[in-house]
Amino acid sequence: MPENKYEIYNIPISYRRMENLHIVFWLFKDIAWCMFWKPLGIIMIIPTLIISIVIAWRTRQIVSELCHNIAITVWISANSFWMCSEFFGVDNNIVFGTTTVKHLAMIPFLTGVVILAYYYFYYKPRHKEEEATL
């Protein structure tokens, strides 16, 4: 059995508090989107996105955490773009062909998928000895 199988992954309490606060901001952003409360939804993008970037930065030493946290950041970006496109009534505007403004959110969504695919199918198999949380 690998020696690190039983290692404990500890998160400093200040990091955990930030992650928990991040969830609160994210929920308020999505509640505002659901209720069509434009000012609150738009304002909540800022702390939600900033905290996700800070979390990714703080976990940059562990590639598995970094990849997942960058994927979360681009997910929030896609989600926020989609929300704003609905708030401003441009979500169904045609960009080209049958592609609408809302469909442009697929760019960051797919970027997150590519980052995770890179991690799981390329990086992780080549670095089995490396510390990982997944």
Image (tube, helix red, strand yellow):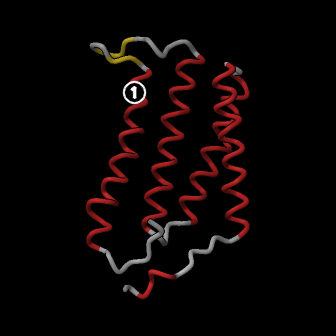
In the rendered view of the protein, which quadrant contains the N terminus? bottom left
93 left or right of 51 in image? left
Residue 88 falls in image quadrant: top right
What residue is at 51 percent from the left and 38 percent from the top? 77
Q: Where is residue 20 in the image (x, y as percent from the top left)?
A: 70, 54
Up/down of 66 relative to 129, above or below: above
Q: Which of 85 and 3 is in front in this view?
A: 3
Q: How many marks?
A: 1
What residue is at 50 percent from the left and 67 percent from the top? 60
Up/down of 2 relative to 21, above or below: below
Q: Where is residue 2 in the image (x, y as percent from the top left)?
A: 38, 85
Q: What element carries label 1?
A: helix
What residue is at 57 percent from the left and 24 percent from the top? 84
Q: Name the residue under label 1.
A: 104
Determine the residue located farthest toward the front in the rendered image.
1
Up/down of 76 relative to 30, above or below: below
129 left or right of 126 in image? right
What residue is at 30 percent from the left and 13 percent from the top? 98
Mark 1 residue type:
Leu
